[in-house]
Image (cartoon, coloured by chain):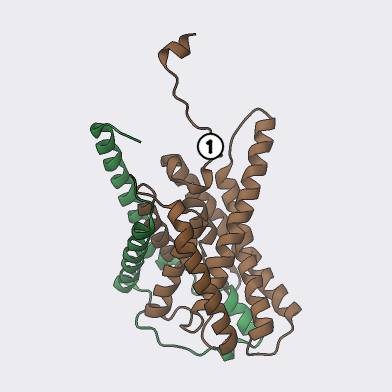
Chain colours: A green, B brown
Amino acid sequence: MSHSPEVSATTTRAARTWWALGLGIALLVTGVISRFASSAPDGLERVAEDHGIAGQAVESVGLLSYEGATALLGLGLVLVLTSALSWTVRTRER
Amino acid sequence: MHVPDGFISAPWSLATGVVAAGAVALALRGARRELDDRTAPLAGLVATFVFAGQMVNFPVAAGTSGHLLGGALAAVLVGPWTATLCLTVVLLVQALLFADGGLTALGTNVTLMGVIGVWVGYAVFRVTARALTAAATRHRRPRPFIPVAAGVGAFASVPAAAAGFALLFAVGGTAPIALSTLLSAMVGVHLAIGVGEAVITALVVGSVLAVRPDLVHGARGLLPTPTLVSHAEARS
């Protein structure tokens, strides 16, 4: 595949805009929408409580909790790790 | 859906760890075919979105919530092998930094959400997308219905992962409970969560498809490909 320089410059710019928009949405979900998240136990926790399994859980202490800056740190780490991984395994052009 | 430490016995945790490691090894090879210079940046974005989505619990019944698992969503957008890698990174960061899902349960969680969730979701998506496309083509209105098919795959993926947990607990669980009881309870509540999964997945896939249909892995071979026709050909 060969693109003229102008065409690929335009597509690169469009791709960057699009990518930044996607990241913005992920940040919005983390920073704003997560404030409205339900704090009720999730499906597995509910079933475990109802059927006497919950007591088996060994609570491990997390370094961080999903709040504000720490959630963003997790988000950034996932982004960096997955991007590095996918960029490494990808099929290179030419 | 994150299994904590202590639910599954040590030997079975080890077994799911082996399954997860094998799946990741295969996925590292498989993802090579799915990722190129164009699609690789999308994988990071998809994993980030799944991580964000998993933090947002939505209510499904009194006193019960659910959250996006994201396996089907990732598989449709970037391909199932890459989706297994994305989910593994998300689960790894959650377990290491946030103690969301136990460290010894990491293999279990990758198996349930990154393997069963991803592959059941993707298989059901493929079958549904092909059936809908064929039906639409017969009615001379070729449309791929990819967001709808993605929603159906996403819906199926959640009770599938839940059933996987019940089966695993039946053999390696640390509390005595009849399989039938646990299976019906797990599948029951996760059918409801699956509806939320379906809605989110269909909306996100629909949005990406509207802006960048060329990047959606699940749409390959299903979308009508634009053909280039020269002026001479067009006139003749």
Viewport quadrant of the N terminus of chain A: top left
Outermost top residue: B236
In this rendering, the answer to whether A47 lies above or below B38 is: below
In this rendering, the answer to whether B222 lies above or below A69 is: above
Residue kind at label 1, given as amino acid type? Leu
Of residue B64 and residue A20, the one placed in the foreground of this image is A20
Which residue has dot 1 on it? B223
Q: Is residue B80 left or right of residue A68?
A: right
Q: For residue B11, which quarter of the picture?
A: bottom right
Residue B10: give x, y in percent of width and height.
56, 89
Residue B226: give x, y in percent of width and height.
47, 29
Of residue A13 and residue A93, the one placed in the foreground of this image is A93
Chain letter behind tag 1: B
Of residue B73 and residue B168, the one placed in the foreground of this image is B168
Q: Is residue A41 visible?
A: no
- Count residues near mark 1 (Cα–Cα under 10 Å), then give few for <14, some for 14-19, many for 20+: some
In this rendering, the answer to whether B205 lies above or below B234 is: below
Q: Is residue B230 left or right of residue A80?
A: right
Give the residue at x 41% y 13%.
B231
Give the residue at x 65% y 27%.
B140
Q: Is residue B19 visible?
A: yes
Q: For residue B169, which quarter of the picture?
A: bottom right
Of residue B176 and residue B196, the one placed in the foreground of this image is B176
Residue B147: give x, y in percent of width and height.
55, 46
Viewport quadrant of the C terminus of chain A: top left
Q: Is residue B180 left or right of residue B116?
A: right
Residue B154: give x, y in percent of width and height.
58, 57
Give the residue at x 60% y 65%.
B158
Q: Secondary structure at mark 1?
A: loop
